[in-house]
Image (tube, rainbow, N blue to C red):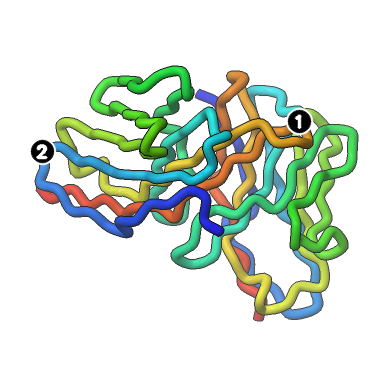
Amino acid sequence: GAVVSQHPSRVICKSGTSVKIECRSLDFQATTMFWYRQFPKKSLMLMATSNEGSKATYEQGVEKDKFLINHASLTLSTLTVTSAHPEDSSFYICSARGPSSYGYTFGSGTRLTVV
Amino acid sequence: DQQVKQNSPSLSVQEGRISILNCDYTNSMFDYFLWYKKYPAEGPTFLISISSIKDKNEDGRFTVFLNKSAKHLSLHIVPSQPGDSAVYFCAASGLRTSGTYKYIFGTGTRLKVLA
């Protein structure tokens, strides 16, 4: 079946540093990818929608300059958490639209801990 | 404002019996619904979906029922197996004024199937 690879699965970084999370669709092309954040005991919250070759669309309340999204190819989208703070610690999940028109395939998630 | 609600945070069911997970939504513009299953430290995996033109969709042991008038959907798992133990999220989407779709997730229900 369709696979979306997300890397790294877990990362610990110091406050003030930047962290890049990669999301790759391995066996299909994904013109649209989504980035979610999950707080403890909360639902997945959509952060932004990234479209290949264009700027990402951010949801209300999500800081564009803090969460940089790049969708440089049909199989790769990256989320960079810049100048990370402890409150950015969370579980981040990407998903790609596909392979079917309605299907969404999720990555395995990244647990970010900022110390 | 939680547009998609899963009011039961957890559910325990005996192996072989039926598991019923419930989901309520408030936005009458939602026209597509999905159920996802999530194991710890993994991303959600797609389980089953239903369009608003249907009231039932079945796939093996999994059946989703949609009651549009009540804005309620449910996932039935029969017979339940220990491997079904996971967190189940329902998600709903509808066409936004921007011309894009956005999936709104519920907070999840943790299902535990007892052997």
Q: A28 or A44, which is in the foreground?
A: A44
Q: Earlier in the sequence, mark 1 or mark 2?
A: 2
Left or right relative to A87: residue B53 = left
In the picture of the structure, the residue carrying the numbered disc 2 is B17
A39 up-or-down from A96: above or below: below
Q: Secondary structure at mark 2?
A: loop
Amino acid bearing label 2: Arg
B50 up-or-down from B86: above or below: above
Residue at point 78% right, 36% down?
A: B98
Residue at point 82% right, 65% down?
A: A66
Q: For marks 1 and 2, give the CA distance.
A: 42 Å
Count of residue discs: 2
A37 up-or-down from A32: above or below: below
Percent x, y for residue A55? 89, 42
Q: Quadrant of the N terminus of chain B?
A: bottom right
The circle on residue A2 is: none
Amino acid bearing label 1: Gly
Left or right relative to A62: residue A39 = left
Quarter of image, res B107: bottom left
The circle on residue B99 is: 1
Q: A20 or B32, which is in the foreground?
A: B32
Q: Secondary structure at mark 1?
A: loop
Sort mark 2 into few (<14), some (14-19) or many (20+) by Cα contacts within 10 Å. some
